Image (cartoon, rainbow, N blue to C red):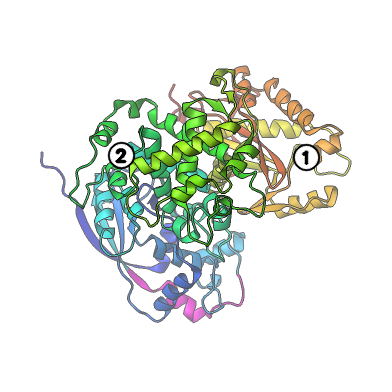
Amino acid sequence: MAEKANQLGVKSKTIESVYREFTASAYGVNRRYQRKLVWTVEEKERLIDSIINQYPLPQFLVAEDVTSRDYQFEIIDGMQRMNAIVAFIENEYPLRGEYFDLESLAITKEKKDEGTLVQRKPILSRAESVKIATYEIAQSVYRTDHSSSIEEVFRRINSSGQKLSSQDLRQAGSTSPIADIVREIASRIRGDHSTSDVVDLAGMKALSIASNNNEYGIKPEEIFWVRQAVLNRANVRTSGDEQLILDIVADMLFDPVPSTGTSTRNALFGVESFDGRSADARFSALLKDPAWHSGKKRTLVDDFMQTFDKVLEIVAEFGEDSRFPKVIGQKGNNPVPRYFEVFFVAVWRLYSVERLELTNPAAAADQLRLHPAFKSMPGGGGEWPSADKEAIIKKLCRSLKVAFDAPRLAENARPRTSVMSNSEFASTVSEVLLESSAYEMKQGLLRLESGASVITSTLFDRILRTVTAISNSFPKQGGHVLIGVADSDSDADRVYEIYGVSPIIYRTLRIVGVEREADAMGVSFDEYWDAVIRKISMSSKLDSSYAKRVAKSARVAVHEGRKMLVIDAPTTRDPVAFDGKYFERIGTSTEEVKDLIAFGRGFDL
């Protein structure tokens, strides 16, 4: 039977109809090849101005993948424009200081009446708002039953001109295991990690780098690379962080390290070189290693992130007024990715290869200050020869070794830390904002009443019931309950009235912390934590093995000094009961299961 050909059709749609499709979660974004939302407010305003003036817009290209059950369309070209249109309709930014009139469309009026959308003022005229809503765009619909065809179309569209950076193009559609590794590490460090490659367009704003007026995205100054001046904002927006991570991963995979440059990067991503040079045979052999399919990717990601946590410990000793370039003696505002690369690899060799424990981060920071090895760094951005890079790494290893003066314990002998790393917390927050049904936020475990000093069974049972509901609704993914985060302004206000604690706002989360509850109970935070873990593990309303898994995986997260409890809802193969009943998540609510037969079909029994 002949293979079904790919098909391309063109439709004309009003912006109102596109917005209706958006609210129905019709549009998915594949993070394997799509970059982040990077348009500034000024760029968005220019687009809306073009629409009001009835200027033509470029076609929007979407794919209709008949094999996908998640989304009707996958955006190939036009994500920035589509997000700009939707964001304007939802009053996220104005045009000439005026906001879209939510009363001009039935669907936005309904959302306004429900409180889902809030009308901001001053309001754009009804006539101009309707003019925007009735503007017709051209949407090309590419129908295929091969997801690889979608990725190839994206690459071809963006391979000419200067639309994407070299790293964006390299990443687009690459099937190399290195591409998956780089993408996951980069998203965890930035704090925009998602459990799925394809996400709803509506969720992209929570996973993108914020512009000055976008409260939903990740603030550039909070990203490690920018905060430490290793890279600048523009570098991160154009995936310079992923390119740096790729260079480091290459150094971790080979001994001696390979040269740093375009040819190495392309070879590791399985991309053909355009300069006529043949790839190192080591790269081809590496990509064909069957171990990538049996845990090697996870091992490498974990190895990188464990080393990154050690790097954070060292960086924390720099002092508030010192960033990485200043510490190593670099002047000016130029990014210093290669300097960081050799520093990271030196720490990795000591911690992961030589299996030494970082016992004195302050000493490591002192060794870095004005280290002479950095004076031999090559200028410019051309090819960095292997031998030159290897020599600098070895010099740094010899100096930093003074701070690594004890052998690492075997993993099964290491005490499990109960404190989340900063990167883990940032990733958790992104997942909360992206998939609210799999997460729950609670201000605390005590009643919001003056004088409350006892963790009541009613409140605690409600939390454990929610944990089981999340496991049941997301058995292959799991989720979390965050305690110490107010889920409403009214709860945050009440916490302030009772405890005098104002919320710390982090990407729309209202962090109120739980130390105040330990103080109210007259115990230390460690005693408070131990009491919570005991109540989970000894709960008579949970299966004992499930209760132990929840207790064992519970963590503490810290943001700007505020402590929160992160209670995991673990993955499960079987339905989980609470007090003999089964619960599931319906939106952001926890409901008792009505149809047990249909419910059971969601599990691998």
Amino acid type of disc 2? Ser
On screen, residue 465 versus residue 134, left or right, reads right
- Local secondary structure at mark 1: helix
Outermost residue to the right: 451
Residue 414 appears at what percent x and percent y? 60, 21
Residue 138 appears at what percent x and percent y? 30, 68
Residue 480 appears at what percent x and percent y? 59, 37
| Residue 321 visible to the viewer | yes
Where are the magenta residues, as a range? 120-137
Q: Which residue is mark 1?
A: 515
Number of other residues with Cα within 10 Å of mark 1, as a class: few under 14, some 14 to 19, many 20 or more: many
Q: Which mark is residue 453?
A: none
- Local secondary structure at mark 2: loop
On screen, residue 289 versus residue 327, left or right, reads left
Q: Nearer the viewer, residue 406 or 168?
A: 406
Q: Earlier in the sequence, mark 2 or mark 1?
A: 2
Assess whether residue 587 is covered by the magenta stretch. Answer: no
Q: Which residue is mark 2?
A: 176
Residue drawn at x 62%, y 60% is: 115
Assess whether residue 127 is covered by the magenta stretch. Answer: yes
